[in-house]
Amino acid sequence: MNTKLFDLSGKVAVVTGGNGGIGLGMAKGMADAGATIVVAGRDAAKNAAAVKEIQGLGAKASAIPVDVLKEESCRALIADTVKAYGRLDILVNNAGMSIRKQPEQYTLAEWHTVMDSNLTSAFLCSHAAYPAMKKAGVGKIVNIGSMMSIFGAPFATAYAASKGGMVQMTKSMATAWAKDNIQVNAILPGWIDTALTRRAREQISGLHDSVLKRTPAARWGVPDDFAGIAVFLAAPASDFVTGAAITVDGGYSVQG
Ligand code: NDP
């Protein structure tokens, strides 16, 4: 096998929300493949712990605090990364959240918080990253969608809109930036055991068991399940893959 296909040595990857959950799972996978990781979250203690964990794998890592709800913070994240490392090869737009309410209970402010956290943030970080990637003549952008990119749910109006939008934005950026040798793809996770879904399980009765029942793999996912797909989409192995939305869900979305 050509091992360079999955080699990230010398590459620099920014992972928004890389301080826990799925983001940290992807960050550790890419670190293990040789990448330097920039952990970009709000919570300073979580950022520091994640950097320590990644460095424990023998990789280089640092944290840049970011609030993806703020345009200037997204732009500073990318600018500071390029300043610190002289390059940005991989951007993973993973930061996200949900407000679980029936649509009629939503305020406009809540709608904007979900849309801006999940979708506008990915647009802003990608927009900020494009000049450096274009200049380098190579780049990888990985956007995190959801089963709610495909399905709907009574509690997920804004979340599903943001995650559906993430897939369409991925396709459009992929078509726009293929000429610059920048690949833009999405990962659609199934139900994964993280802080986000621990809250969901408290709020939605029966969720834990209904996920288990519907998932052919018969388990909830774990953050480490995202290490492999992140490496693939960040590495030369995926150089002719762009605009794709790849499910990582233990078969949840194909169960009839
Ligand atoms: P977590 O709650 O563990 O992670 C969410 C991450 O997003 C945290 O690192 C958090 O950082 C960061 N974040 C949220 N808001 C902001 C903000 N305004 N600025 C900066 N960082 C922010 O949950 P998951 O790991 O589960 O979620 C990661 C992604 O995966 C999300 O996009 C989520 O929608 C998606 N996803 C998750 C699924 C699951 O089953 N768990 C299923 C499908 C998709 P901090 O704590 O520092 O604010």
Image (spheres, rainbow, N blue to C red):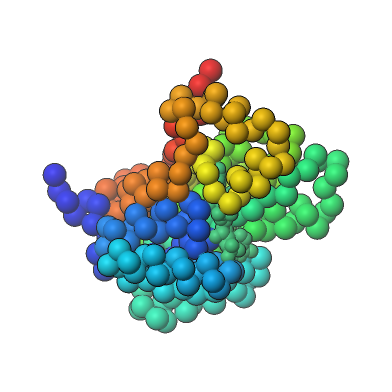
Q: Position of residue 185 (x, y in %)?
A: 44, 48
Q: Residue at x 15, y 48 (%)?
A: 2
Q: Is residue 188 left or right of residue 200?
A: left
User: Is 248 rendered above or below residue 52?
Assistant: above
The reply, left or right, for residue 97 in relation to residue 191 is right
Report the side of 4 relative to 226 (left or right): left
* Farthest top residue in view: 256
Tell me what residue is drawn at x 55 percent, y 23 percent: 213
Residue 154 locus on image (x, y percent): 74, 34
Residue 136 seen:
no
* Residue situated furthest left in the rendering: 1
Q: On the image, which quarter does residue 42 sit in? A: bottom right
Residue under the point 80% across and 39% down? 102
Above-or-below relation of 31 to 200: below
Where residue 196 appears, as percent x and y from the top left, is 61, 49
* Residue located 32% across and 66% down the image: 56
Q: Report the image quarter containing ligand 1.
A: bottom right
Q: Which residue is more in the foreground, 176 or 216?
A: 216
